[in-house]
Image (tube, rainbow, N blue to C red):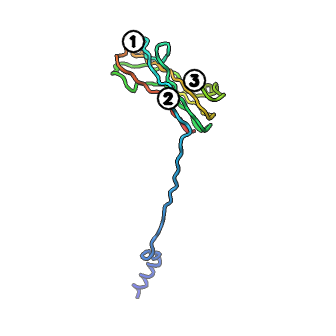
């Protein structure tokens, strides 16, 4: 009799788990967000080679400055960040150092606040950041120069050289 009472007590304390089952469901909520800032290359860059130890995007040296376009449909939601190159992404084998210089600047804007973009931008090393305060289009021009051999100015080996301008929209 004591065993029967003990069994009944254990079953009642465990909530009769032997006889009941738990049912649950998980309902997912999904969503999709499309960026309201698009980055495109309007003008590809080209290095001119005015002397044996310099590659430059300066038009006076047969170079072409790359121009990156930012199309923004939502004001005050993004920063445009653009960096001039600090290394080659592909090149012939180089046995010495390459000194990099460059600049990033506003070429054009669809906003009436054209001058404000450049004056309100911030610079960290090779990267310049612009607050996209207005919806519209902003064109950024990049200048790049590579000098081979550091202070000793050595001739670049023959071959193809590629460097990359990094341009991105960063959500605020």
Specify whether residue 139 is in view: yes
Q: Are marks 3 and 2 in contact (CB under 8 Å)?
A: no
* Of callouts 3 and 2, the N-terminal one: 2
Q: Are marks 1 and 2 in contact (CB under 8 Å)?
A: no
User: Spatial distance from mark 1 to mark 2, Cα to Cα?
Assistant: 29 Å
Residue drawn at x 53%, y 35% as measured from the top left: 38
Task: Indicate whether 5 appears above or below 57.
Answer: below
* Of callouts 1 and 2, the N-terminal one: 2
Residue that numbered label 1 is attached to: 52
Closest to the observer: 27 or 145? 27
User: Spatial distance from mark 3 to mark 2, Cα to Cα?
Assistant: 13 Å
* Of callouts 3 and 1, the N-terminal one: 1
Task: Indicate whether 52 appears above or below 5.
Answer: above
Marker disc for residue 10:
none
Closest to the observer: 142 or 41? 41
Task: Tell me the SS state at disc 2.
Answer: strand
Residue that numbered label 3 is attached to: 107
Quarter of the figure with residue 130: top right
User: Spatial distance from mark 3 to mark 1, Cα to Cα?
Assistant: 30 Å
Residue drawn at x 52%, y 22% as measured from the top left: 103
Specify whether residue 101 is in view: no
Position in image of residue 37 (x %, y %): 55, 37
Q: How many marks?
A: 3
Task: Tell me the SS state at disc 3.
Answer: strand
Residue that numbered label 2 is attached to: 41
Position in image of residue 54 (x %, y %): 43, 15
Task: Classify 10 Å Cα crowding around label 1: few (below 14), some (14-19), many (20 and above).
Answer: some
């Amino acid at each position: 009799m004591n065993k029967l009472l003990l069994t009944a007590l254990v079953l009642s304390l465990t909530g009769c788990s032997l006889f009941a089952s738990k049912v649950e469901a998980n309902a997912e909520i999904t969503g999709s967000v499309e960026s309201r800032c698009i980055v495109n290359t309007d003008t590809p860059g080209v290095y001119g080679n005015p002397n044996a130890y310099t590659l430059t995007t300066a038009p006076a040296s047969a170079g072409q400055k790359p121009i990156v376009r930012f199309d923004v449909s939502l004001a005050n939601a993004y920063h445009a960040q653009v960096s001039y190159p600090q290394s080659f992404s592909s090149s012939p084998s180089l046995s010495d150092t390459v000194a990099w210089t460059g600049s990033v600047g506003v070429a054009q804007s669809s906003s009436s606040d054209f001058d404000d973009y450049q004056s309100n931008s911030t610079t960290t090393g090779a990267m310049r950041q612009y607050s996209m305060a207005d919806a519209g289009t902003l064109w950024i021009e990049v200048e790049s120069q590579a000098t081979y051999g550091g202070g000793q100015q050595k001739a670049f080996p023959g071959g193809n050289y590629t460097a990359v301008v990094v341009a991105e929209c960063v959500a605020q």
